[in-house]
Image (cartoon, rainbow, N blue to C red):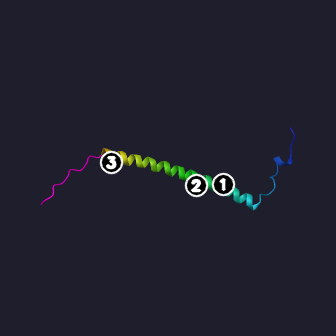
Amino acid sequence: MSISKEEFFKPGKLSSADKAENTNTIARQIIAAEDAQRASKTEKLRLLREQREADAAPAPARKKRG
């Protein structure tokens, strides 16, 4: 087992383009995860609303006075 300086010291500094790309990638991952979560929640709520509307009894029709 040999010891190298890479194990103890940080590698060279990242360029600003590399930092921007890393930030962009992470931000896009977060946005995609939030979008998937929002879509899942919307679908769940839509199904619950449709089920509630199907279970609700129709309101009795009112007679018109004429």
First-in-chain label (2 vs 3): 2
Q: Residue at label 2? A: 31
Q: Crowding at label 1, few (<14), some or many (≥20) Cα neighbours within 10 Å?
A: few
Ranked by sequence position, the earlier of labels 3 and 1 is 1
Disc 3 is placed on an element classified as helix
- What residue is rendered at 49% in x and 50% in y? 39
Residue 36 at x, y percent in the picture: 53, 50
Name the residue furthest top. Answer: 1
C-beta proximity under 8 Å, tags 3 and 1: no
Residue 41 is marked as none
Q: 4 or 30: nearer the eye?
A: 30
| Alpha carbon distance from label 2 to label 1 | 10 Å
The magenta-colored residue range is 56-66
Q: Where is residue 22 in the image (x, y as percent from the top left)?
A: 69, 55
Tell me the distance, in whole angstroms, between the alpha carbons under discs 3 and 1.
Answer: 42 Å
Q: In this view, does 28 lie to the left or right of 63?
A: right
Residue indicated by mark 1: 25
N-terminal label among 2 and 1: 1
Tag 3 residue:
53
Residue at 46% of width from left, 51% of height from top? 42
Disc 2 marks a residue whose amino acid type is Ile
Q: What residue type is labelled 3?
A: Glu
Classify residue 54 by image quadrant: top left
Category of crowding for the residue at label 3, using alpha-carbon neighbours closer than 10 angstroms: few (below 14), some (14–19), many (at least 20): few
Q: Residue at position x 66%, y 54% from top?
A: 25
Q: Does the magenta stretch include residue 57?
A: yes
The reply to whether the magenta stretch includes residue 59 is: yes
Would you say the magenta stretch is mainly helix, strand or loop?
Answer: loop
Tag 2, which secondary structure? helix
